[in-house]
Amino acid sequence: MCGIAGIFYFNDRPVEGGIINKMTDALAHRGPDADQFWSEGGVALGHRRLSIIDLSTAANQPFFDASGRYVMVFNGEMYNYQEVRDKIPDYPFHTTSDTEVLIAAYAKWGAEGLQHFRGMFALAIWDREKKELFLARDRMGVKPLYYYYDKDRGMLLFASEMRGILATGLVRPELNRAALVDYFSYQSMTVCPLKGFDQLGAGCWMRVDGRGQSTTRRYWDVTAAKMDVDPGDLPAIQRRIRELTLQSVKRRLVADVPVGAFLSGGIDSSAVVGLMAEAGDSRPNTFTVAFEEKEYDESPYAELIAKKFNTTHTNILLKPTVFLDELTNALTAMDTPSGDGVNSYVVSKAIRKGGMTVALSGTGGDELFAGYPFFDQYLQLQQKRPLYRLPQGLRRLMARVAFGSGDGRKGRMRQLLGLPSPDIYNSYPIFRQLLSPRQLREMTDLPGTGAMTGSITAIGQELVRRKKGLMALPLLSQVSAAEYLGYTQHTLLKDMDQMSMAVSLEVREPFFDHDLVEFVLAIPDRWKKPTYPKSLLVESLKPLLPDEIVHRPKKGFLFPWELWMRNELRSFCEGYIKNIAQRPFVNGAALNDCWKRFLAGDETIRWGELWLFVVLEYWLEKNGIG
């Protein structure tokens, strides 16, 4: 796990001395073990290394292939690199690293070499012969890769984080207000928050030649579901799920350093820990966040699992005073603003202090095995499909009469019934909505909010572009795929990467293994619709998980934010709310009124809606964006 950065001047003018160093200095937290550079003419590559596989200096980057034609910087892990290495018997390997296998595969197969790998990665390869730059990102989008492409100025800059690009001084940060619509709607940004910046898509590669001409291709699509067993044979399906899940965990135990695990005591993290023990990790290292507020504390369930699988377990008691000490560190770690993620920072830092460099997480189980309530809500919406034969205007009138003009669940129902159709590309953006269109209109003056529907947001537009593939999936898998394209990619994975890498911890998520994802997305709804939460996963892994874990009330990984924002965090939040209320895109009077009502105990004002404004203002001030 590392940080990568690079510069490509199309006119071949020499890269300014020291500029690539500034880029990697901005990424130092991602790789404290080595800092190296390479430049030649109009190209410079930089790398910060967090050593996981082959800890020797021979595996440091930038890395050259045996011929000297290709030079690469790479962030991530290729879990099956030993298998791929065996397919290239004629290559003169001199390290035991996945890095060398990756560049050897590119030298042999070009872009097609990506198909051979199972892993999480972002990479850049310079072809010294053709004078071409090749960029690629893993299938699920676990590892980030940002770029700034300016053909008029003849340059392309790229890095693992936007701050690496900003460190060059070649780009002035300017807020992309259009990105804020998705931020306030879904608590993270589907498009980059700075003008001129972009992110290479998950499962995509891009090639840029010496004239600045670029070609982008998608080499994997999340809607590519496939099964290798009879879809009517439930026992065979369950056996295959177990095989693939265990295989995924085994892959993610490959490391030359100790591996730990997040353990909440829920189904997903407990399954990962149980499979770690089964895969050969005789005594896994596990970590749980505990609270004094019992309604938020899950440590008794985690301790039950720790005892069952004989783990070396650590409880991290999180008091408000500790959280306050870490809060600004966590917010500073955000390369892009997010309404979530602070929890990931705190537990990641604790695990890193516990001596771990790598940790497994149960993130992704809900998305894959229909664990969220809106999976079932989407099925219920499909039962109302006959209503959509009525004229849209009539349905909107009926919805206003039936559900009024408020927000919350009734507001969502009103929006859903007013859609052109109940299909996933229309309905998913509403299921995932945090601030409603009405709230956005009242509290902001952002582009498109005057008549906003889900399809106007960036995630809505992306789902419309991918609707052919989405609609070919079973209904529950349509929701899973939409989750991968939306919340998962732009909130869950982005937050986990930026927060864990801020403390130099590599996090691996077995439920985002693309072989497992492809199989589960092809499973018919009748097997996946739960008799209890995630029953397909639990039944497939039996008797791994005890009933006390399977049938306990679901809490999720939550902090007592509402309590803290009204007490210990009150002055902190109040200051940033006061400042952002002065921004031209915010209706300050409406925002301040919401804050006062929240403090007074108004249950219609949710803490998460206000926290979005706090985080955004902190990020704007930290980055000097007016």
Image (cartoon, rainbow, N blue to C red):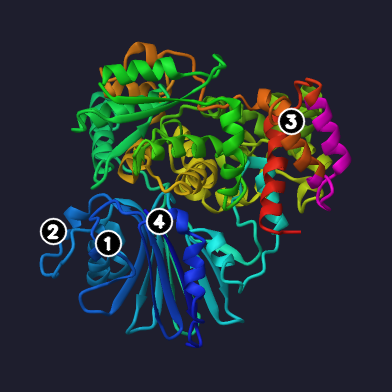
Disc 1 element: helix
Please report the residue visible at 56 percent of the width from the left and 62 percent of the height from the top. 198
- Crowd band around label 2 with a 10 angstrom C-alpha radius: few (<14), some (14–19), many (20+): few
Q: Is residue 31 above or below residue 324?
A: below
* Residue 581 part of the magenta segment: yes
Magenta stretch bounds: 579-598
In the rendered structure, which amino acid carries the disc numbered 2?
Asp
Disc 3 element: helix
Magenta stretch: helix, strand or loop mostly:
helix
Q: Is residue 93 above or below residue 236?
A: below
User: Which mark, residue 570?
Assistant: 3
Q: Residue furthest left?
A: 89
- Mark 1 lies on residue: 99
Q: Quadrant of residue 539?
A: top left
Q: x%, y% of residue 597?
A: 82, 26
User: Which mark, residue 398?
Assistant: none
Q: Nearer the viewer, residue 536 or 246?
A: 246
Q: x%, y% of residue 249?
A: 27, 37
Please report the residue visible at 54 percent of the width from the left and 43 percent of the height from the top. 491
User: Which mark, residue 86?
Assistant: 2
In the rendered structure, which amino acid carries the disc numbered 3?
Arg
Give the CA distance from mark 1 to mark 2.
Answer: 15 Å
Q: Point out the tag, 1 or 4, that comes first from the N-terminus.
A: 4
- Mark 4 lies on residue: 31
Q: Nearer the viewer, mark 4 or mark 2?
A: 4
Q: Point out the tag, 1 or 2, that comes first from the N-terminus.
A: 2
Give the CA distance from mark 3 to mark 2.
Answer: 58 Å
Disc 4 element: loop
In the rendered structure, which amino acid carries the disc numbered 1?
Thr
Instruction: Answer whether labels 4 and 2 touch (C-beta < 8 Å).
Output: no
